[in-house]
Image: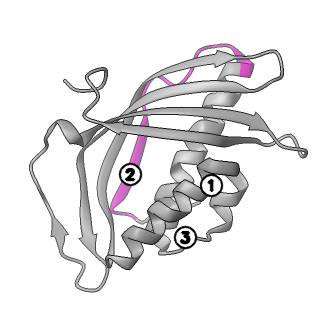
Amino acid sequence: MKLPSDVTETFEGWKTGDSTKDAILTAAGKSQTAVTYAVTQGDPKSPALSFYQADTALAGSQDWVKSIVEAGLTYSGSVRYYAAKISVYADESAGVSYCADESKAFNKNRKTKKVDKMPATSDSYVLYSTRLEPNDKGVRQTTKLQSERGNRACTP
């Protein structure tokens, strides 16, 4: 997944030193990037989404991407993901929560390419709570995904 040159994602502190946890965090990050990629490509049915997501997470992400595309928008700017917390369970599933700083990410009109640089608010900070489970091919997919804008755990 190659993002456009005007879109960047940074995963700050997403290494624990534990190979299992680091692999799960990598999968969670790729799941997040798959959403960004689908938006920038204008494709709610992007194969990247269904590779890294399943179940309610996939359905929700496809709906989210579809709403952005139908509004004639895409993204420009940078998002920083930080404060990742992980719990690994006996069945090889995991819970991962993390914050996103979207204060430097902006809506971009897909046709005119005009970027809407709005000032940051508390809603520019998002808490994500996810569940990842290995599929039958061993790929850890995000199966549940919730987000909460303006959550105090993520706002500066």
Q: Which mark is residue 58?
A: 1
Rendering colour mode: one colour
- Taking depth in this image into account, of 46 and 22 the one nearest to the observer is 46
Query: Which residue was labeled with disc 2?
Result: 8
Identity of the amino acid at label 3? Pro
What kind of element bears circle 1?
helix
Tag 2: amino acid: Thr
Answer whether residue 93 is visible to the viewer in this image: yes
Q: Which residue is drawn at 25% across and 22% down?
A: 152
- Tell whether 121 sits left or right of 137: left
x%, y% of residue 18?
Answer: 69, 14
Q: Give the range drawn in magenta.
A: 5-20
For label 3, the residue is 44
Residue at (42, 39) in percent of width and height: 147
Residue 101 in percent (x, y) is at 29, 37
Q: Which corner quadrant of the image does residue 47 belong to?
A: bottom right
| Other-residue count near label 3 (Cα within 10 Å), few / some / many at <14 / 14–19 / ≥20 | many
Whichever of callouts 2 and 1 sits on the residue coming sooner in the sequence is 2
Viewer-nearest residue: 132 or 2: 132
Q: How many residues crowd mark 2 within 10 Å: few (<14), some (14–19), many (20+)? A: some
Q: Which mark is residue 84?
A: none
Which callout, 3 or 1, points at the residue further toward the start of the chain?
3
